[in-house]
Amino acid sequence: MTPAMQQAPLVDEQPAHPALPPVHLDQFEGPLDVLLHLIRSQELDIFDIPVAMITRQYLEILDSEKKSENGLNLEIAGDYLVMASTLMQLKSRMLLPRPEVDDEGNEIDPRAELAAQLIAYEQYRMLAEQLNERPLMGRDVFTRSVFPETEDVERPLPQADLDALLLAFRNILKRVGGEVRHHIFSETMSVREQMGVVLERLGDSGGMQLDELLRDTPGREALVTTVLAILELWRQQHISVVQNENYGAVTILKRGMA
Amino acid sequence: MNNAISPLQCEVEAIVLASDEPVSLKKLRELLGDAIASADIRSALADLETAYRERGIRFVEVAGGWQFRTAPEHAELVRRLWQVKAPRLSRSALETLAIIAYRQPTTRAEIEALRGVKVSSQMIAMLQERGWIKVLGRKEVPGRPHLYGTGKQFLIDFGLGSLQELPDSTQLMDEDEIQQLVSGPFATPPADDASQQPESEHAEQS
């Protein structure tokens, strides 16, 4: 008895099919992208994926990538190898003499899940392209703020949110290089100490820009401690954090001032 | 459509030009005072939009407000003026952004499952820095992962009035629809006819 009638031929019955042009993985976004390329460029039916053929072609691509100049990029290798094993498992499932059946006794096609995943991804791939075709600010269309920020302009300062603060911290930490020595120190007291220092520095002026506040802090560890101190002060509502414009300078104000 | 420019239109122009961000109808009402009817403001906005369609500057509605921006035809000139090159968005960024835009709120795990690859933290950070995505909260499941959605800047930068204007959002199939689509052709086992192909009429994908 031949393999289940309901399932497509496993063997590549199309020897006349022309060889695919060589592909490099860096043209692709991942295994799904590669599979879609194989399916669409050869005009295969996504609802009737010829598993053996696709698996062979996919593995050939991985193989040629391994042999290429740079080899298989370790960072992405994992995702590609997982798909390779998924395909090979799919191939074995297709070889089962009887069709697979779900809990309710309905026949299932082992390829259905992969087809679903590919279709879902293809949608977003297309939507992404469509997004890119829109006139994009800074690339195709431009706008200009007419009034530059001046110190004289009296405007109510908008509250910065946590995201903005964390982003500002990240940028500052990036600028301070150096190693972080891994040693255990009395964190709580250091942070408390810094809280006091920060409040003192805010002192009479009542407020200071984040950059300035962190400027003279020596080294990464001290910087991190100060950052924690600022967050704690904010949480305890001893200070407020404001930001005049998106990605603008962040200002720390002592509560009760301004 | 009113061809001559009205005083109200002039006032709206001035306000919109002088604003850092798109000006909403609400803001305009606030600035122009109660004497002016909303309907009149709306009509002025529509007239301005039409009038500027012919010009090198456009008057557009984005993110729930109105803004002036240069016409896309002159992109090259402005880039020359600013001495910048056309920035290129990577496909990873665009796909990640598309998934977040259309599926928000969504988690990183969902994005990775859809794309079939890991999403890098730098990618997420970059999209956040631009204000295109933001953390909306956390999903109350083990691990309490972040839930991502788009920010106002996404609407502004991509020229959308609101999320409802995202193209093809109605045609987007969700998991159930896709499941139906893929199990359709295989739902009924055909008769013993060995030559019968298990294809369904509605299996055509555009």
Image (tube, coloured by chain):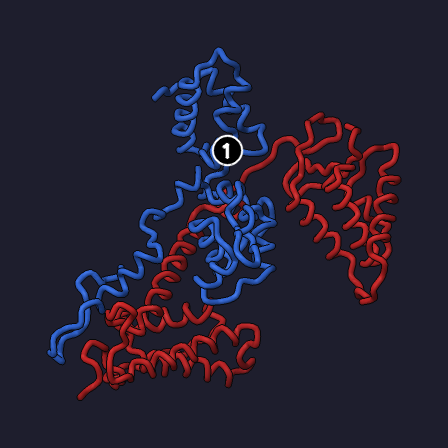
Chain colours: A red, B blue
Judge by depth and name the residue closer to the eye, B100 or A183.
A183
Where, by quadrant of the figure, is residue B180 drawn? bottom left
Amino acid identity at mark 1: Phe
SS class, disc 1: strand
Residue A247 place in picture, x, y as percent: 65, 43
- B34 up-or-down from A18: above or below: above
| Residue at point 38%, 78% (across, down) | A87
- B89 up-or-down from B153: above or below: below
| Residue at point 65%, 37% (across, down) | A245
Judge by depth and name the residue closer to the eye, A189 or B198.
A189
| Residue at point 41%, 17% (across, down) | B40
- B128 up-or-down from B118: above or below: above
Quadrant for the N terminus of chain A, please. bottom left
| Residue at point 31%, 50% (across, down) | B171
* Drawn side of residue A213 relative to residue A111, left or right: right
Does the rendering let one see residue B86? Answer: no
Query: Pointer 1: residues within 10 angstroms few (<14), some, or many (20+)?
Result: many
Residue beneath disc 1? B68
Residue A15 place in picture, x, y as percent: 25, 86
* Drawn side of residue A211 relative to residue A10, left or right: right
Residue A241 place in picture, x, y as percent: 72, 38
Residue A203 place in picture, x, y as percent: 87, 35
